[in-house]
Each structure stands twice: as C-alpha cells, then as structure tokens.
Image (cartoon, rainbow, N blue to C red):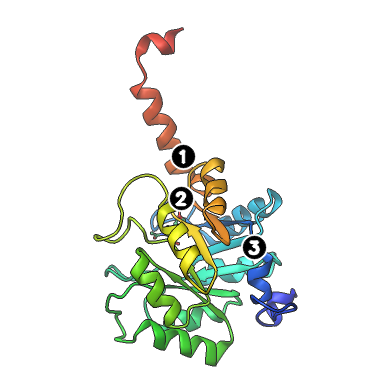
Amino acid sequence: MTSHQQGPMTSTTPGHPAVLEAIRGRLVVSCQAYPGEPMRDPGTMCRIAQAAAEGGAAGIRAQGIEDLRRIRAALDLPLIGLWKDGDGEVFITPTLDHALAVAGTGADIVAVDGTLRPRPDGRTFAEIVAAVHDRTGRLVMADVSTYEEGVAAAEAGADVVGTTLSGHTPYSRPGPSPDLDLVAALSRDLPVPVIAEGRIHTPEQAGAAIEAGAHAVVVGTAITHPTTLTRWFADSVTRSPREVRSE
Ligand SMILES: CC(=O)N[C@H](C=O)[C@@H](O)[C@H](O)[C@H](O)COP(=O)(O)O
C-alpha cells in the first residue's frame, strides 16, 4: 500500500498541492500503447512505467483503467490518469463517468479534454471539474490545444493545464515540434501550473519547455513508443544517400 492509494496527496506546504510540488521542474513520462499494438497490455505498460521511474521520471501519465490500477499498485509516484475512449473529437476522458472511473484507480490527477468542444455526455468541462473535486478530491488536468482553451480551462477550475492537444485539433498549431510559444504564453498568464506536453522529442526540447516557464514536462512517444522511434530511424536510414551508408 502506498501513500497514493490512501487518497490524494494533500498539501504539506502553502501553494500547489503536494502532488504538483512533487513534479515541479521535473519529467513525467507518458506510458501508452495504442489499440492493436503489441505493447497494449497493462502488465507491459506497468513495466515500462517502472523502467521510466528507474531512469528518473518524477511522475507517470498513463491511459486506461487496468493500466492505471497496475501502475498505482507498483509505483509510489504522482500519477496522471486518463481514459481514451470513443472515436469522436473528444476522446481523452470524454465524460464524467470516465473521469470518475479514472479517479477510482487512485490516479492523483485526472486528465480530461479541456477544449471547448461538446462532450458525449453533454456536460461542460467546468461541470466535470466540479464533480471530480466534490466526489473524489482528485486534481484535474485540462488537456488543451490553444491559448483560449487554456484560459477557459483555468477559469473553469482546472488545477493544472497541459498543452497536450496542440496540433491535435484542426484549429491549433500543426507541425512536428513542441508548441513552446503556447507553453510560454500560458505559463505567463495562468494562475495554475502549466505542463508542457506533446511532440517533445529530445532532451533539449524538454529543457527548453522548462525554460519557457513550464511547471513540468511530459514526454511520451520519444521514451515509450518503440514503433514510432523505430520508424524515425528506419526512415532516416532509407532516405540516406547510398554512398554515405557504404562509407
Ligand atoms: C494527442 C494525444 O492523444 N495525446 C496522448 C495523451 O495522453 C498521448 O498519445 C501522447 O503520447 C502524450 O500526450 C505525450 O505526447 P508525446 O507522445 O507527443 O510526447
């Protein structure tokens, strides 16, 4: 039994809740595999999370009820939980029922789509935040894609805002690199901590996100998704001029 399994970490110092203090200026590793992939297995994700912890992850972000239960039982680190479900536009913890189920796993922070798009259960983001707070005492992370969404999410009661969905909505900034401008603007203007998440592929980019003002950095693909990592290398090798390879 870990302290996290007893309930949400309570604040020991003025300011942010303890779980947010624990990840301040640190790396959180997102451990996720996608439907149909060989690593889509709670035991496998738990081992990946344990490996990330050994490497210095200060927190873990994970998806799916069983993955979260396994990781919660195995690791005494701040845990950001979500449940990706459905094939609609809003798929990150899309309804209040999803959010309550995530909270029930012992995750310290429930990550919820924080965009302004309609949700399958018709609730607003503010209603979901209020219900999670009232019924579970857990914190809520708003996954947003733009500055306006970040401001609205903080006003709606989010405890922490992440840039997770930048580049993943049709109206946000596309491109392969992290949206550090969004990280900087939200970090400057929001009264709650901002987590840099999404398309952070190198240690330099992770450091730059902290420099831009991020409270913490979440890295997923570049640490825990070997299929994508392999594709990066495979594509680079096959695109290289033959003479370079034969040197
Ligand atoms: C858009 C979406 O569904 N993002 C998901 C959110 O949990 C994950 O698939 C990402 O891996 C995670 O956000 C970390 O980002 P990156 O893998 O780029 O480091």
Under mark 2, the amino acid is Pro
Under mark 3, the amino acid is Arg
Is label 3 or label 1 in front? Answer: 3
Using the image as rendered, state which of residue 5 and residue 110 is in the foreground: 110
The residue pinned by badge 2 equals: 38
Q: Position of residue 210 (x, y in %)?
A: 57, 53
Sooner in the amino-acid sequence: mark 1 or mark 2: 2
Whether 87 is drawn above or below 177: the answer is below
Gap between marks 3 and 2 measured at Cα: 33 Å
**Residue at the spot x=45%, y=77% of the render?**
154
Is label 3 or label 2 in front? Answer: 3
Q: Position of residue 174 (x, y in %)?
A: 30, 51
Q: Position of residue 141 (x, y in %)?
A: 49, 72
Bin the neighbour count of mark 2 within 10 Å (Cα to Cα): few under 14, some 14-19, many 20 and up. Answer: few
Give the secondary structure at mark 1: helix
Q: Quadrant of residue 137?
A: bottom right
Sooner in the amino-acid sequence: mark 3 or mark 2: 3
Give the secondary structure at mark 2: loop
Q: Quadrant of residue 94?
A: bottom left
The residue pinned by badge 3 equals: 24
Q: In the image, is 66 to the left or to the right of 7?
A: left
Give the secondary structure at mark 3: loop
**Residue at the spot x=33%, y=55% of the render?**
167
Q: How many marks?
A: 3
The residue pinned by badge 1 equals: 229
